[in-house]
Amino acid sequence: MGEPVLSHPGVERPIRGRTRRDPKPHFKSDTTAQLGGIRGYPAWQVPAGHLAPAVQRSVGRLDLSSVEAQYSSLGGRGSGRRKLSAVRVDANLIWIHYGAKLAGALQTDAALRLLSCGHAISRSKRNEFRQQHGALLSDCGAQTVATVQGDGLLVLDDVAADRMRLRAQASTKTVRTFSRSQKRLAELAAVDGSALSTADPETHRASVEKPACAASECETGARTSIVTTNLSAALLKVPDGSGLPGHRISTMVAGAQARFLIEILFSADTNDDGLLEPIVEKTEKRLGRSAVCPATQSSRSPPTRVTLPRPTSPPTRAGAIASPS
């Protein structure tokens, strides 16, 4: 029997990739206009004059192109960055600060479902958005200040500096203090190395390396404690007397009643000494003018008022949002 006759070899063609025809990124579609038999119609459930539509309009004025440009129009299954921002803003306004509570509210609250376009955004996605886009959130604050100042709503007659403590997203197991590390190093130094078995020296060296690195970082940064998973946090005292990982927050606010937040400063300091001048400098940079800063400030003093001269015209900023006509 003869050899089978094979056909001519096929022509090799390059694999065609998907062409991105739409420059705009695609996210999950808006389902709030669809009538649901169980959850209802969010657009009808939210009453007139509710806070949610105002939040939606305010977030719609923000420039998020720097982040949205990282997403393609070929996928379209992720949650929109604008939706996540609106949900986080509205949740803070109604005093929902815990992820588990917000996850439940996204299932039942009509206003939050309207802002999320009818999708229950998972807790992991919200945490991922906050952790990966810290620069975006800071820029949104600058855009908000520029917009409010351009609309003439920012009253700079009274500007006050205030302080607070914020619980950090870190476990107490990741806290390393300088005193404990020094004490642990002294205990390990007293161990007789010649009495250790063959496998024990490696364990001993690993035990020494952990407090040694913590003590070195504390000395380098002139700190009493560090948090290994969050370098901007430290061990702070809380009202119940215990110590938890937290941030020292310095804020600059304007207005006696509205208390509009102008600038915020995160630090790992255990007290407020020396934090007034940095927050004033950041406020000057954001507003584009100088302020009168007291030379010293007590850590137990009331909020310090800083008088800023009234501007003749709102400052211009690259990428600022135009006021609506």
Image (cartoon, rainbow, N blue to C red):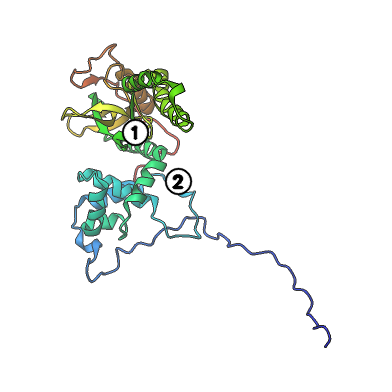
Q: Secondary structure at mark 2?
A: helix
In the figure, residue 180 lies in which quadrant? top left
Image spot of residue 165 (x, y percent):
24, 29
Residue appearing at x 42%, y 19% in the figure: 220
Image spot of residue 295 (x, y percent):
29, 11
Kind of residue at badge 2 = Val
- Tell me, for residue 67, which label it has, or none: 2
Q: Residue furthest right?
A: 2
The residue lying toward the viewer, choosing from 299 and 256, is 299
Residue appearing at x 20%, y 61% in the figure: 45
Kind of residue at badge 1 = Thr
Of callouts 2 and 1, the N-terminal one = 2
Query: Which residue was labeled with disc 1?
Result: 174
Horizontally, residue 297 falls left or right of residue 69, namely: left
Q: Residue furthest left?
A: 240
Q: Secondary structure at mark 1?
A: helix
Horizontally, residue 98 falls left or right of residue 60, namely: left
